[in-house]
Image: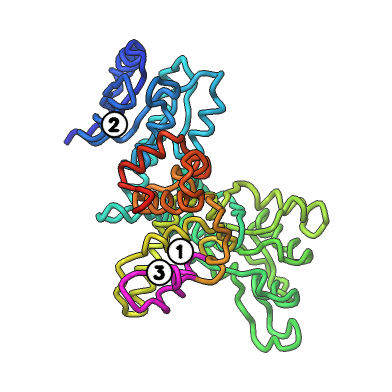
Amino acid sequence: MTPQKCRVLYVDDEPAYGRLFSRGMEDDDRFSIITATSGEEALRILQDCPIQIVLTDLLMPRMDGLHLLEEIKRCWPDTFVLMLTGVDSADKAVKAMKAGAYDYILKPLDIAMVRLQLGKILQHRQLLQDTLPPAGDDYRFENMVGKDPIMFKLFEKIQQVAQSEATVLICGESGTGKELIAEAIHARSRRCDKPFVRVNCAALTESLISSALFGHEKGAFTGAATQKTGFFEYASKGTIFLDEIGDIPVQTQVALLRVLEMGSFQRVGGTETINVDVRVICATNQDMSTAVKEKTFREDLYYRINVVSLAAPALRERKSDIPLLAQFFLELYQRKSAKTISGFSRPALARLCNYHWPGNVRQLANAIERAVIFCQGRQILPEHLPDELHNESEHDFSLTLHDSSLASVEESLIRTVLEEKHWHLSHAAEALGIARGTLYSKMERYHIQKDS
């Protein structure tokens, strides 16, 4: 059976460029090329048939590339968008990426480079199709949930790293899901059917951590009544995850370095050399380069664990995932509490989206669990949310319309901002991060009036 081609829509107000692009892609049977000469025409095509990838010129009359990107992300959030721009407007292309574009390509086009970018997008789409359940809207990669572009790129890196045996260092703030990333690496690796052993280094005292990691012999110290097997032996042939690696004392760091370099260690109080085949994944919320400078972490060990580095993004860096994550946790906790809750009211969802979440996804999960406990009706309301969300400045509109793909959230945000700005359209548009004309068209779309 011939695989279905990926539909690519090329948008440029100069028809000649569209024809050149179509001819340049003729021999690539992975793609079916459609062209448009304006943003308005592109939107009509998107309404008529499914488009997987859009390449759009940034500078066009009437509807420019940024406005087109905004409409695509609002109506077709799963469509990948590549921006085409000249060197003199590359700064605008970076702005477009922050608004949800996958990447930008400089003109004049290098067809080989375009094919490379399109190929990467195909890999991303395949990655999602391989992990998404049939329902389609529950964006999961192993045990993680997200569809923000920053998460797509993380998923791709995890897939690549999982195929290697390299030691991995996962960096990120508390609550960002570093352990979930480690689990995903293990699940996608050749060791997936072997043990995955979790170790919270911060929870182990300095006197016990060596024994916990490497085991001890009978009589090695007071209270060592029997021989004990350590975490590294338990993880043999599998993966060991060392969370909060920065809290390991310097003395234990020496033994850990030996395991990484030689694949062997000795139990505490023992003389026998034990060989193990274990993949090591570490995580930290500390600045390890600072720890090295302050001599609290060995430099040689730092370079040994930092063969591959992955960053767990803070929730404020992926705010478009907040509605998705909120719904995920709502379904989880309502099942546990045997309640039936249909969803969130618009004001409640707007509050969730505008909060800065210093505790990241873990804090969001706790907030939703609390809301489910206090909710007695069919919807989560603002009063069910934690107090810190109510204390957030009403003027903090850090979620712009570019960040959300849900029309209900968009409408609620527009109404809230208009009221806060006393229906001054220019001020409201500036707070929302969109043009005044765009705000006006959205007000018409949602039938928003001052007396509504």
Q: In the rendering, which numbered label is found on residue 43?
A: 2
Give how far apart the Cα atoms at labels 3 and 2 are. Answer: 35 Å
Q: Of all residues shown, which one is farthest toward the left? A: 1
Q: Amino acid at mark 1?
A: Lys
- Mark 2: give few (<14), some (14-19) or many (20+) Cα within 10 Å: some
Mark 3 or 2, nearer chain start: 2
Q: Is residue 26 left or right of residue 297?
A: left
Q: Is residue 158 left or right of residue 409?
A: right
* Boundaries of the magenta span: 363-385
Between residue 332 and residue 327, name the one nearer to us.
327
* Residue at image mark 3: 381
Mark 2 or 1, nearer chain start: 2
Residue at image position (64%, 70%) is 213
Q: Of all residues shown, which one is farthest toward the right? A: 294
Please give the count of numbered marks on the rendered protein. 3
Which SS class for mark 1? Answer: loop
Q: In the rendering, which numbered label is found on residue 194?
A: 1
Determine whether 399 is above or below 70 in the image: below
Residue at image position (34%, 16%) is 21
